[in-house]
Each structure stands twice: as structure tokens, then as C-alpha cells.
Image (cartoon, helix red, strand yellow):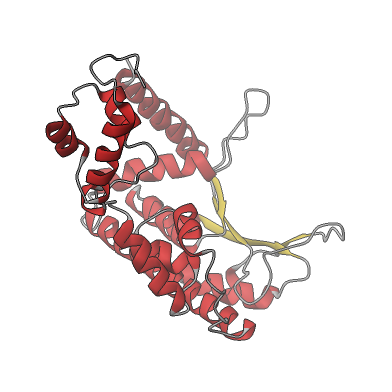
Amino acid sequence: MAHPTGKYADFEALRDQAVALRRAGYSLRQIREELKIYNNDILNQLVKGEPPPAWTKRPNAKDDLRAKARELRLQGWTYDQIEVELGCSRSSVSLWVRDLPKPEPRYTPEEQRQLMNDGLARRRAADEEGRRRTRDAAHRETRELTDRELFTAGVALYWAEGAKSKPYDRRERAVFDNSDPGVIQTYLAWLDLLGIDRKRLGFRVLIHESADTDAAHAFWAEIVDIDPSAFARPTLKKHNPKTVRKNTGESYHGCLTVTVARSADLYNRIEGWWSGIVAHARTRLR
């Protein structure tokens, strides 16, 4: 039967030879050379339906991963574990092992929860250790604080937390309150640096009416090194039944208010110092 290609007119005879060579393990290149067929379309038609020999197949890079995934699945590993172990996607793991039986759970629900809680505890401990190292390193950076640095810090601290006069209400009194013992101690050290006599200082506790005021007085007395009897009558905050308070318990001591008597001059100096700091800061922004 004539074939339209002319040169390859006896197509069926050529196909028989090509198929025989293919089944004998020849590659397309070898068949081409053997039969002198240099037209790729004709060559492919001659071997159509015949699979290539195994040795001509390019190795699949994922074959080993697939085999390992199936092995691990048969050992009872979960998809998550296989994914982490082999570094492949979950979709690949599912494709490779979904025909295998689902392994029995390795842990009871209670054991699983305990393992999860233990893991969270270890993670939190590691995170806290990292934060501690950061805090310690930062602490060492400020270990040697000069009087000038304490002065500047005190001005900024007062302007952030202290009472301030308003243009419409000039009170000009140095009044400072805070609930952080460290902040209070830093403020007192700053007043000492300015030469403010401790006899000019007055102390008052601002606390919730349901809290233990005697315990609060004892706490703050130790912080500022005074006798508890030196405190003025505490200012009590009324309880709002609609509010859920979190500042409760033995760690709650309210706020301490520190007032400097005859402090109009001190207050005006603080305003001036702060305006100077702001003016300097603005030059850095230009």
C-alpha cells in the first residue's frame, strides 16, 4: 500500500520493524539510526502505542521521597510529621500515601493535650529566656548613668507623668504620681539631684476603696523609706460595678502621689527645661 510520504511507502513493514526494535529495548534515537527514519513525526507514528524501555526514562527526583513517605506512613507517621521530615508539601504527601490505611492514633486525646501543653510551656520558657537576655543586655548599657543623663530623664519623666498647669488654670505645683515603684524611686532620685529637701515632700496613696490601704501604706513606706504614719489620708477610688477590675490581689498597691511644697519655682524650671529639650529635638528633625 502506497504511503503519502513516498520514501516510507511500505509503512506497515517499517512499523513492524520499529515495534520489534522498541520491544527489544531500543530508544527512539537507536531506531532512527537503525531504520534511517529521520522524520520525527513518522518515527513517532511507527512506535505509537509502544511504551519506551525503562532504561530510557528519566529518573523522577521525587521517586525517593515518595517511597520514603510511604514507608513512614506505614510506620504510623502523620501527614504533618512526614511533611516536616521530608521537607515537602502536604499536597504531595497526601498524593503519595492517601491509598494507605490511616494509622492508629499514637496518643490518647488526654496525652495529646498534655504533649501540646508541654510544648507550649517549653516555647514560652524559651521566649522568656530570649526576652530576659535582651533586658539584661539593655540593663548593662545603662549601668553607668551620669547626673546629666539622670537630670534629662527626670525632666522627661515629670512631663510625661507629672501634673501640668494649663494656660487657663495656672497652678504651678510639682505633683507626681505613679504605680510603678521604679518610676517613683527614679523621680525621688531626680529631686535629690536638684537639691530638693526631703522635708518638703508629701506622700499620699491613691487606691481603690476595696483594697487594703494599710498594706499599701506599708508597701510604699518601704519603697520611699518613710514611716507609714507620714502618709496623708488616702484618696479612695469608688467602685464601678460595671467595670471588671484587673488590678486586684496582693500585687495591687495603688498609686503614690508625691507633692513638693512651695514648688512654683521648681515647676516653672521644669517647664523651661522641657521646652529646651523639645527645641533641641526639633533641630534633629530638620
Instruction: Residue at 29% x, 62% y: name it.
Output: 64
Residue 150 against residue 80 in the figure, above or below: above
Where residue 245 sits, quadrant-wise, is bottom right
Whether residue 135 is visible, yes or no, is no
Residue 100 against residue 162 in the figure, above or below: below
Q: Nearer the viewer, residue 101 or 269?
A: 101
Determine the residue located farthest toward the left in the rendered image.
Answer: 33
Where residue 207 sits, quadrant-wise, is bottom right
Residue 215 against residue 90 in the figure, above or below: below
State which quarter of the image contains the N terminus.
top left
Q: Nearer the viewer, residue 13 or 270?
A: 13
State which quarter of the image contains the C terminus.
top left
Task: From the viewer's perspective, tell me whether residue 1 is left or right of residue 241.
Answer: left
Task: From the viewer's perspective, tell me whether residue 151 is left or right of residue 254.
Answer: left
Percent x, y of residue 194: 35, 47
Percent x, y of residue 284: 30, 21
Task: From the viewer's perspective, tell me whether residue 116 is left or right of residue 11.
Answer: right
Percent x, y of residue 152: 34, 40
Where residue 42 sits, quadrant-wise, is top left
